[in-house]
C-alpha cells in the first residue's frame, strides 16, 4: 500500500506540476499575445494620428504659400483659398486670416471690415473691449477674415490677439520660427466651446523678412486624437503641456475634459510621441481590459482542467492498481506462509542440531575416560541445566537475544547469591548467550572448592563494560573471585579449560586470559560488540517471526 500510495502521489505530483506549468505557459502566452496586440493597435493608432496631424500642417503650409495679395488689409483674403482649403477635406472648425497691421493701418482695416459686412468692425482686444489706437506704437495682429462665415464667426473679425495668453504666444512663436506653430489646448469659438488646437502659419510677402500675417486653422482635439473608437483595446489621452500631471481625455461624445493623473492611480500602458506645429505631443494609452486578470483567469481554467484530469487518472490508476495489488498480496501471503513454514523447519533443524552438537560435546568431555562418575554426573547435570536455561530465555524472547544479567540467575549457575553483578544492561545474541551461559557456569562451579584464605567462601565480582564508539565498540568482561588462591581453588577440568581459553573467545571473536593475584582469581574476556550483539542473526530471526499480513 505504501508503494501504491507513493506511485499515486508521484502521478498526482507530476499532474500538478504539469498543470501548473501549463497554466504558467498559458498565462505567459496570454500576456504576450495581449501585449503584442495592444502594442500593434497603439502603433497603428499613433501612426494614423500622426498622418492626420501631418495633413493638417501641410494644409497650413499650402495656404500660407498661396498668399500673393499686394495688400493684406482686406476682409476677403481667404476667398481665393477656399477651394484649396476644402480640397484637403480636413475637419477644421474655423480658418482665420490674421493681418499684422501698423497703427496707421487700423482705420483702413476698420473700414474694410465694415464694407465686408462684419457685425462689429471696431478694432478691439480679444475680450471685445475697444482699443485706444492712438496709444499704439507697434504692429498688432488683427483678425480680418474667417471661414466658414456664419452667425457665430462673423462677430470675430476686428479682434486683436496680441494680448491673448495662448494665441498671442502662439503668434509670437510662429513669427520667430517662420513656420507653422501649434498652440496649447484652448476652448474654440467661445469660452465653453470644444477644446482644440490652433495652428498658425506665417505668411511672408515677396521681399519681406517679417510676416505680413498668419493663416490659422482651429481643430477640435477629440477628432485629432481619434478618441471615439468604442471597439478599441485602449483609451487615449493627451498629456496636457500646461501641467505636468494633467491629461486631456475625450468621452464617447467627443467632449474633451482635463483631469489630474494621480501618482497612486493607474499608469498608461504605453506612450507615443507625435509632432504637430513644431511641438512634440505625448499620447498616453490606457488598456481597457485588464490583461493580467484575464490571463490569470485563463490560467486558472487551464490549471483546473489539468487538476481534474490528474484526479481522474489517479483515481482510475488507484482503483485498478489496488485491486491488482490485493489479488497479488493474497497470492503472496499463501506463498509466504509456505516459504515461512519451510524456513522455520530449516531453522528449527539447524538450531536443534547445534544444541545436540553442544550437548554431545558436553557429554563427551564430561564423561571422558577416567572421570569420577559422581563428579561427572554433577557437572553434566549442571552444564545441561545451564544450556536448558539459556534456551528457555531465548524462547521467551523469540530468539531475539538475552539480557546479559539474566544469565546470572540462580537457576542457571551455582552460588549465584555470592556473585556481585554489574555492567550495562545489554542483550547478547543467541550464539553468544549459549557460550556465555556455559562460561559462567564453568567459572561458578569451580569457585567453591576447598577453603578460602580466611576460612570463608570466595566473594565473586562479575563486571562488564563497553568501550569505544560505533562501529569499533569493544566488550570487556571480568570475573574475579576474592578470598581464593591456586591452592584452595579447584582446578579447572579439561572441558572447562577448553571452554574458557578457546571455545568462548572463538565464539565471540575475541581473546581471554586467566590468572591469580595475591588475593583473587581473575578471568578476562575481550571481544568486539558486533559479535556479542549479532544483528544479522537477530534480523534473520525477526524475518522468521514476522507473520505475513493478508491484503485488505
Image (cartoon, rainbow, N blue to C red):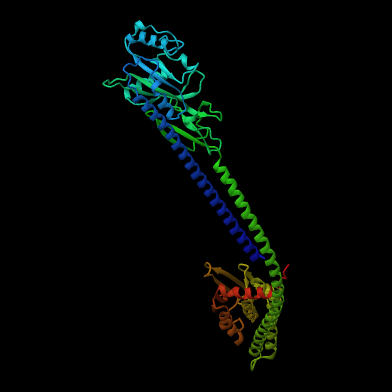
Instruction: State the residue in front, 97 or 37.
Output: 97
Q: Farthest residue toward the left?
A: 207
Rendered residue at 63%/52% (across/down)? 304
| Quadrant including the N terminus | bottom right
For the image shown, how many numbered marks are present on the structure?
A: 0
Instruction: State the residue in front, 242 or 344.
Output: 242
In the image, residue 373 sits, relative to residue 191, either above or below, namely below
In the image, residue 156 sits, relative to residue 364, either above or below, namely above
| Quadrant including the C terminus | bottom right
Rendered residue at 56%/46% (across/down)? 295
In the image, residue 514 sits, relative to residue 552, either above or below, namely below
- How far across and how far down the image is residue 413, in percent? 68, 77
Instruction: State the residue in front, 179 or 104.
Output: 104
- How far across and how far down the image is residue 468, in percent? 52, 67
Quadrant housing residue 326: bottom right
- How far across and how far down the image is residue 241, in percent? 43, 27
- Residue 94 visible in the displayed image: yes
Determine whether, in the image, residue 187 is placed left or right of residue 383: left
Instruction: State the residue in front, 136 or 344.
Output: 136
Determine whether, in the image, residue 102 is placed left or right of residue 125: left
Q: Farthest residue toward the bottom?
A: 369
- How far across and how far down the image is residue 10, in percent? 60, 61
Amino acid at each position: 500500500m505504501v508503494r501504491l500510495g507513493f506511485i499515486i502521489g508521484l502521478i498526482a505530483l507530476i499532474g500538478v506540476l504539469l498543470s501548473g506549468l501549463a497554466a504558467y505557459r498559458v498565462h505567459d502566452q496570454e500576456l504576450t499575445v495581449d501585449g503584442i496586440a495592444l502594442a500593434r493597435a497603439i502603433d497603428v493608432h499613433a501612426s494614423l494620428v500622426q498622418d492626420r496631424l501631418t495633413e493638417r500642417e501641410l494644409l497650413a503650409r499650402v495656404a500660407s504659400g498661396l498668399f500673393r495679395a499686394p495688400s493684406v488689409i482686406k476682409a476677403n483674403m481667404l476667398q481665393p483659398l477656399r477651394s484649396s482649403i476644402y480640397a484637403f477635406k480636413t475637419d477644421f472648425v474655423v480658418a482665420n486670416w490674421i493681418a499684422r497691421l501698423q497703427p496707421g493701418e487700423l482705420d483702413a482695416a476698420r473700414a474694410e471690415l465694415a464694407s465686408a459686412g462684419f457685425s462689429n468692425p471696431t478694432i478691439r482686444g480679444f475680450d471685445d473691449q475697444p482699443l485706444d489706437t492712438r496709444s499704439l506704437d507697434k504692429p498688432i495682429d488683427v483678425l480680418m477674415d474667417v471661414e466658414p462665415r456664419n452667425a457665430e464667426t462673423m462677430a470675430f473679425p476686428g479682434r486683436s490677439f496680441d494680448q491673448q495668453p495662448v494665441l498671442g504666444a502662439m503668434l509670437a512663436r510662429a513669427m520667430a520660427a517662420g513656420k507653422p506653430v501649434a498652440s496649447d489646448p484652448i476652448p474654440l469659438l467661445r469660452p465653453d466651446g470644444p477644446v482644440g488646437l490652433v495652428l498658425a502659419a506665417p505668411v511672408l510677402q515677396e521681399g519681406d523678412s517679417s510676416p505680413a500675417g498668419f493663416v490659422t486653422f482651429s481643430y477640435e482635439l477629440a477628432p485629432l486624437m481619434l478618441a471615439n473608437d468604442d471597439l478599441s483595446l485602449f483609451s487615449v489621452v493627451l498629456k496636457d503641456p500646461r501641467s505636468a500631471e494633467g491629461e486631456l481625455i475625450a468621452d464617447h461624445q467627443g467632449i474633451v475634459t482635463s483631469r489630474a493623473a494621480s501618482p497612486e492611480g493607474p499608469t498608461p500602458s504605453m506612450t507615443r510621441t507625435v509632432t504637430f506645429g513644431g511641438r512634440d505631443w505625448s499620447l498616453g494609452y490606457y488598456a481597457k481590459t485588464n490583461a493580467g486578470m484575464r490571463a490569470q483567469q485563463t490560467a486558472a481554467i487551464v490549471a483546473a482542467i489539468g487538476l481534474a484530469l490528474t484526479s481522474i487518472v489517479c483515481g482510475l490508476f488507484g482503483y485498478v492498481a489496488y485491486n491488482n495489488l490485493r489479488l497479488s498480496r493474497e497470492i503472496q501471503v499463501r506463498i509466504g506462509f509456505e516459504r515461512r513454514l519451510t524456513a522455520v523447519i530449516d531453522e528449527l533443524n539447524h538450531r536443534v542440531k547445534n544444541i545436540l552438537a553442544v550437548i554431545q560435546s558436553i557429554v563427551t568431555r564430561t564423561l571422558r575416560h577416567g572421570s569420577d562418575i559422581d563428579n561427572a554426573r554433577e557437572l553434566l547435570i549442571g552444564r545441561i541445566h545451564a544450556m536448558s536455561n539459556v534456551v528457555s530465555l531465548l524462547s521467551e524472547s523469540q530468539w531475539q537475544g538475552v539480557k546479559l544479567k539474566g544469565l546470572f540467575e540462580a537457576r542457571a549457575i551455582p552460588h549465584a547469591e555470592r556473585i556481585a553483578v554489574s555492567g550495562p544492561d545489554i542483550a547478547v545474541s543467541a550464539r553468544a548467550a549459549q557460550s556465555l551461559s556455559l562460561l559462567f557456569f564453568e567459572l561458578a562451579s569451580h569457585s567453591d572448592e576447598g577453603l578460602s584464605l580466611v576460612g570463608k567462601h570466595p566473594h565473586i565480582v562479575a563486571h562488564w563494560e563497553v568501550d569505544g564508539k560505533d562501529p569499533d565498540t569493544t566488550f570487556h568482561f571480568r570475573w574475579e573471585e576474592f578470598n581464593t588462591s591456586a591452592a584452595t581453588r579447584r582446578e579447572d577440568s579439561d572441558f572447562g579449560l577448553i571452554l574458557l581459553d578457546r571455545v568462548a573467545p572463538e565464539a565471540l571473536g575475541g581473546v581471554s586470559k586467566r590468572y591469580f593475584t595475591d588475593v583473587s582469581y581473575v578471568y578476562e574476556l575481550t571481544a568486539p560488540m558486533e559479535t556479542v550483539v549479532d544483528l544479522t542473526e537477530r534480523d534473520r530471526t525477526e524475518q522468521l517471526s514476522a507473520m505475513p499480513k493478508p491484503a485488505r
